[in-house]
Amino acid sequence: MNASPGVRSNLSGRLSGKIALITGGGRGIGRATAELFAQEGAAVFAADLEHGDPYTSSAIHFLVLDVGSESNWISAMDEVSALYGGVDVLVNNAGIAGSQKAILDEDLDSWDRVVSVNQTGVFLGMRAVLPTMRANKRGSIINISSIWGIGAVPIAAAYQASKAAVRHITKHAAIAYGPDNVRVNSVHPGIVDTPLVQAQSGESNAQVVARTPLGRMARPSEIAHALLFLASDESSFVTGAELYVDGGYLA
Amino acid sequence: MVNQQVDTVDISTQRLLGEVALITGASGGQGFAEAQVVAREGARVVLTDVVDGGIG
């Protein structure tokens, strides 16, 4: 992990004894989160479409998972069950930007793919872990939305619609499963230095940075630390919340 | 259940080592609980209040 000024990198066991599953765990925010959660004592399943670079920690198991496929989720949960009883923490992080076009320029296949990964993927992920979390009477689900799940811009209609849906189903799930002591929160990153953002136009990224009070992109580890709080028992009374980690963009 | 969770989080991880914190309304209740957590994490803590409720 790249320790940044003010961000601790020593072990403290804030997730010791927990089993975490992180989708989109191969790159970007998901990879940083897998590494941080493992450092903090969790056993981690990092799921993605394909293997990335090897992980630093041997506590991270890689799973192949297309989050939009229910049969993929069933196989993934079988793999988890073979090693552990179930997961205590789910981070629905997998996401794609799509064509980044406005409604009239969008094509339906591209729209469907974005909805499948960003929106249906979150729904299926929660369906996969909720039965065990309800039975155990504990669990923390963190759904990654976006600043574009709150405010709109004139591009990326599918991405924005899917991220707004993530925000709302998070609140639905928090209300529906709160009585089972399952907590569900959404996190809304601003612009983060990840492969997804690097693939976008430099000009539009520069515009977002210019509107960000902290005046820079986040490092993936800065998002991971916010997720660590929500994953740990430190946030035991936090549910249905939306946490902006955006450098002040939405302020 | 609640106590177990608090116990888990009671472990000091020195996340505020070298920081100085000022907490208002800290002589009791929520403010005092905040001061305890912040101090446990290694910060030096200044507690203020309009009443001197005594500390601890």
Image (cartoon, coloured by chain):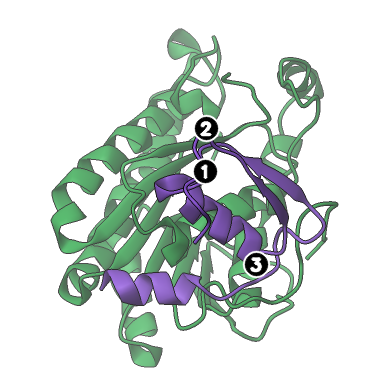
Q: Quadrant of residue A136?
A: bottom left
Please name the amino acid that badge 1 sits on: Asp
Task: Identify the residue at horizontal 48%, vertical 17% (top origin).
Answer: A151
Task: Identify the residue at horizontal 42%, vertical 56% (top origin).
Answer: A235
Q: Is residue A34 above or below residue B51?
A: below
Please name the amino acid that badge 3 sits on: Leu
Q: Which mark is residue B50?
A: 2
Gap in angstroms between the C-alphas marked 1 and 3: 42 Å
Q: Is residue A5 above or below residue A61?
A: above
Kindly tell me whether residue A24 is visible in this rendering.
no
Q: Which mark is residue A36?
A: 3
User: Along the line of sight, which residue is nearer the eye, B50 or A84?
Assistant: B50
Chain B representation colour: purple
User: Along the line of sight, which residue is nearer the eye, A244 or A238?
Assistant: A238
Q: Is residue A137 above or below residue A193?
A: below
Kindly tell me whether residue A1 is visible in this rendering.
yes
Q: Position of residue A170 (x, y in %)?
A: 31, 42
**Counting other residues with Cα less than 10 Å from the Cα at mark 2, is it few (<14), some (14-19), or many (20 or more)?**
few
Label 2: which secondary element: loop
Task: Identify the residue at horizontal 55%, vertical 60% (top origin).
Answer: B36
Q: Quadrant of residue B22?
A: top right
Relative to B39, A75 lies left or right: left
Label 1: which secondary element: loop
Q: Which chain is green?
A: A
Q: Are marks 3 and 2 on the same chain?
A: no
Q: Which mark is residue B52?
A: 1
The quarter in which the N terminus of chain A is drawn is bottom right
Q: Position of residue B43 (x, y in %)?
A: 72, 57
Tags 1 and 3 touching, CB below 8 Å: no
Relative to A199, B12 lies left or right: left
Task: Identify the residue at horizontal 42%, vertical 47% (top origin).
Answer: B30
Q: Position of residue A99 (x, y in %)?
A: 56, 27
